[in-house]
Image (cartoon, rainbow, N blue to C red):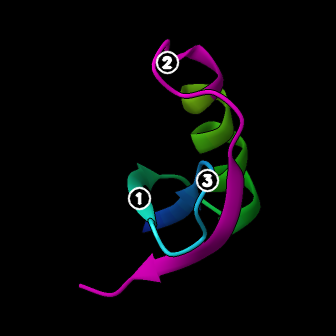
Amino acid sequence: MPNYKVQYYEKIPLDLKTIEVAEETAAKAKEVAMDRLDNQLDVGHYTIHKVVEIKS
């Protein structure tokens, strides 16, 4: 299963943060990352910047 890094920011676009997710497609990786962010207490409003497959 490929690994993806999902980059997001909360308020400042230049302050990118990353979550690594192992899923079959980039769309599914984005969904899983969004679920994780929604369940984190310290993350408020966020914007997904991009989803990139990690080449091994």
Could you tell whether 29 is left or right of 14 in the image? right
Q: Amino acid at mark 3?
A: Ala
Q: Amino acid at mark 1?
A: Lys
Residue 46: give its label.
Answer: none
Tell me if I can see residue 31 in this picture.
yes
Q: Secondary structure at mark 1?
A: strand
Indicate the quadrant containing the C terminus: top left, top right, bottom left or bottom right.
Answer: bottom left
| Residue at figure coordinates x 61%, y 53% from the top left | 29
Within 10 Å of disc 1 (Cα), the crowding (few <14, some 14-19, many 20+) is some
Residue ID for mark 2: 40
Residue ID for mark 3: 29
Q: CA distance from mark 2 to mark 3?
A: 17 Å
Where residue 8 appears, x then y in whole percent? 57, 59
Could you tell whether 34 is left or right of 41 in the image? right
11 and 5: which is toward the camera = 11
16 and 39: which is toward the camera = 16
Tell me if I can see residue 1 in this picture.
no
Where residue 38 appears, x then y in whole percent? 65, 23
Above or below, 36 against 17 in this view is: above
Residue ID for mark 1: 17
